[in-house]
Image (spheres, grey):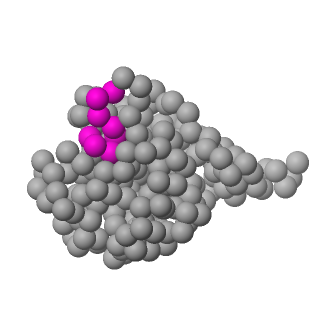
Amino acid sequence: MVIALLLVGGTAARVWWLGRVDERAPTDVILVLGAAQYDGRPSPVLEARLEHALALYRQGVAPRIVTVGGAAAGDQFSEAESGDRWLTEHGVPNRDVLAIDEGSDTLGSFEAVGSVARQRGWASAVIVSDPWHSLRSRTMARDVGLDATTSPAKGGPVSQTRRTQFFYIVRETAGLIYYHLAHASSDFSDPGLQ
């Protein structure tokens, strides 16, 4: 019982801590994880991630931005395409943006990114997602062969209230423990990520 409590508590502390840290450093790519989109228009969560990635790009953190995320049944656009469109509309040249629209969850997206990274010779990435998703994302990125760091988008809806933060810390703690035990995705549809 004590070991289980230490495992859960220690994991939650790591999720919380990494969510508060910005590890940005020069990398091969800025990797923006997907979130909901509406007919090609990013949701507030995805837009906060894209705005942060755009700031990193303009600061010279990486020469290109990769957007990820598939399309839900019936959607005309994928999360990755929606992000790609938003970035080019905000001044990022087409040649510096790549949409990888494979994967219906975080793990599937990272598996697709890992394959593209190996083909293109990319070794490093800075991941842009919500703060509490940073540790699990970085872990998955490293497992597919990327030297990954994180730079969380702290201005989005997921970070606005303590109640919301607590919910996502608990969720990500459970998700990371599950990933370590099963090496499988624990993502599920979350109406809060809109």
Q: Is residue 101 visible?
A: yes
Is 57 in front, or is 39?
39
Q: Quadrant of residue 86?
A: top left
Looking at the image, residue 9 sits to the left or right of residue 59; the answer is: right
Q: How many numbered discs, if any? A: 0
Q: Is residue 157 visible?
A: no
Give the quarter of the figure containing the C terminus: top left
Is 171 in front, or is 79?
79
Looking at the image, residue 150 sits to the left or right of residue 61; the answer is: right
* Above-or-below relation of 57 to 174: below
Residue 95 x/y as whole percent: 18, 62
Looking at the image, residue 171 sits to the left or right of residue 123; the answer is: right
54 in the magenta segment: no
Is 94 in front, or is 187?
94
Residue 93 x/y as whole percent: 14, 60
Query: Where are the magenta residues, as a range?
Result: 75-82
Q: Residue at x 55, y 33 (%)?
A: 188
* Above-or-below relation of 163 to 180: above
* Above-or-below relation of 168 to 116: above
78 in the magenta segment: yes
Q: Residue at x 24, y 58 (%)?
A: 97
Q: Residue furthest right?
A: 1
Q: Quadrant of residue 81?
A: top left
Q: Residue at x 42, y 68 (%)?
A: 119
Residue 107 x/y as whole percent: 55, 49
Residue 112 x/y as whole percent: 47, 54
Looking at the image, residue 93 sits to the left or right of residue 186; the answer is: left
* Above-or-below relation of 185 to 98: above
Q: Residue at x 23, y 34 (%)?
A: 41
Q: Residue furthest top?
A: 74
Q: Residue furthest bottom?
A: 26
